[in-house]
Amino acid sequence: MKIAVTGNIGSGKSEVIKFLSLTGYTCISSDQIIKSLYQNDQSRGYILKKIGVTNKNYKKEIINRLVDPLFNKKLKKVIYPLLYAKKKIISPKFHQHTPIFYEVPLLFEERLAQDFDHTIFVCATPRIRKKRVLSRGAPANYFNLLNQKQLKEGIKENLSDFTINNNGSILNLRINIIKLLHTL
């Protein structure tokens, strides 16, 4: 069984995946795969060359250029094939485990929901999500930009099979995850 975990920026998708991993479930995180691509000198060099960004201050430059729809499309054309290739390498290792949880931030925006048996939406208020993102050192314009590019939370919640509320503490989130696991 393949279960997608989605939500808007700062909602707590990574915390859900982290807790599920700690409790013994198999989890694959799109964000972690992309992070590993940028941490590897060879793959980062390939990505930056393809999108026309220099290695110096590349994160800041990418964030600044995300407002350009053509740049955004070009970035996706380079990143997504690498992401899917990594997922294919990782996934077969876990084929005997069930369920497998996949963190997929843009599940509905990229029309990927049909690839999963169930979807879990992690929700939090925009104020809390923004506070979380800013606490990680990201600029406010980054949160605002990505938040605008994502579907509204109400739409995602209606499209999902399950919802986990994450407006409280990590303990409350973990309790909500445990409650949800009992219904799966």
Image (cartoon, rainbow, N blue to C red):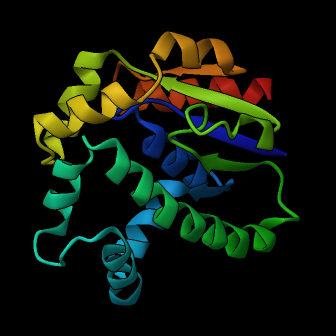
Relative side of 62 to 74, left or right: left
In this rendering, the answer to whether 118 lies above or below 80 is above
- Residue 146 location (% of width, % of height): 31, 35
**Quarter of image, res 140:** top left
In this rendering, the answer to whether 57 lies above or below 173 is below
In this rendering, the answer to whether 82 lies above or below 130 is below
User: How many marks do you count on the picture?
Assistant: 0
Q: Nearer the viewer, residue 38 or 97?
A: 38
- Residue 135 location (% of width, % of height): 15, 40
- Residue 20 location (% of width, % of height): 59, 47
Direction right: furthest residue: 96
- Viewport quadrant of the C terminus: top right
**Quarter of image, res 56:** bottom left
Direction bottom: furthest residue: 42
- Residue 73 location (% of width, % of height): 43, 50
In this rendering, the answer to whether 138 lies above or below 85 is above
Residue displayed at 69% across by 40% down = 112
Residue displayed at 35% across by 42% down = 69
Q: Nearer the viewer, residue 37 or 79?
A: 79
Relative side of 136 to 81, left or right: left
Residue displayed at 83% across by 37% down = 117
Direction front: furthest residue: 70
Residue displayed at 16% across by 49% down = 64
Q: Nearer the viewer, residue 140 or 90?
A: 140
